[in-house]
Image: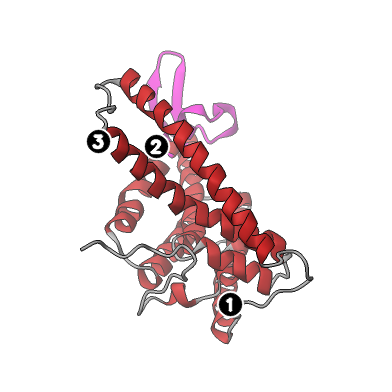
Amino acid sequence: MTAAAVDPYASVTVPGRFLYALNPLAKFAAPMPAIVLLVFVRDFATPLAFLALAYALLLVGAKLTGRLVLLLAVAIPLAAAALGLGMSLWTDADRVDRSVVIAQLGAWTLYGGAVEVGFATGVRLAAIVALSLIAGLTTSGPDLARASVQQLRVPYRIGYTALAAFRFVPRFGHELDVIRQAHRVRGAHGGRGPFAAMARWWGYIVPLLAGAIRHAERVALAMDARAFGAHPDRTERHLVPWRVRDTVFVLALWAATIALGWYFFPWTLA
């Protein structure tokens, strides 16, 4: 018994997780002021507060898969630490506080001010990434395209072209699996090592490209048969409305951004 294929046009819904039920535009608009603010702050406390806020929203409103837990608990902290260490080593010592010496190697000295600046930058970028994941992990591409057409009045020629492009991704994945299976059946899997892998991938390119051209021709014929682009408007099959909860979410996150920015305002001046 084979598993059912995932419809790339379907909306992502997870019971009990409120982020999936929000309009995609609301999830993009809500953290945008915080992201802009984090571009300009230079202290350590402000991005740490926004990082905690983003983590709280993701833990409460997103589905806690193993990949998400690994991303939040391991990948982002390790990336922030590595970036902070690298920025600490490359920060100009003449522009930081030199009262505390962390390490010294010959003529080179690592000061506490450089470490503070480096790790503040790492946490700042981690907070920006975490805020971006609010929309990125809980929004499907087709829903974003539909919302752009319905709420932002993006021309449907652009929106539905994006929907067709999203449809290409699972199609290419399926065709690549079929091509690999055909190569294995014919004994054309090659040997091991990097050169054998390059030869195998080169053998995948031509049939995959031919399949992509055939699929693009079918999509173009289907769009022409449905008079795509002949009228200024089209009837929407899937509606992505803007509800009261979307407005409440945007205003609440904007209010939290203002409150955190105001509370940490004396540190952002430094």
User: How far apart, in angstroms, are the residues tagged by discs 3 and 1?
Assistant: 42 Å
CA separation, marks 3 and 2?
45 Å
Q: Residues within 10 Å of mark 3 (few under 14, many from 20)?
A: few
Provide the residue designation for mark 3.
185
Evaluate if marks 3 and 2 touch, with contact meaning CB atoms under 8 Å apart: no
Circle 1 sits in a helix, a strand or a loop, which is it? Answer: loop
* Callout 3–callout 1 Cβ contact below 8 Å: no
- Going by the numbered disc 1, the residue's amino acid type is Arg
Identify which residue is drawn at 37% across, 74% down: 14
Categorize mark 1 by other alpha carbons within 10 Å: few (<14), some (14-19), many (20+): few
**Front in this rendered view, residue 37 or 208:** 208
Q: Is residue 269 above or below residue 21?
A: above
Q: Is residue 22 left or right of 58 when viewed as pictured?
A: right
Above or below residue 119? Residue 140 is below
Q: In the rendering, which numbered label is found on residue 213? A: none
The quadrant where residue 82 appears? top left
Q: Which residue is mark 2?
A: 82
Residue drawn at x 34%, y 57% as measured from the top left = 68
Label at residue 237:
1
Q: Which residues, given as a range, are shown in magenta?
A: 84-112
Mark positioned earlier in the residue sequence (3 or 2): 2
Q: Amino acid at mark 2?
A: Ala
Query: Which coloring applies here?
Result: secondary structure
Closer to viewer: mark 3 or mark 2: 3
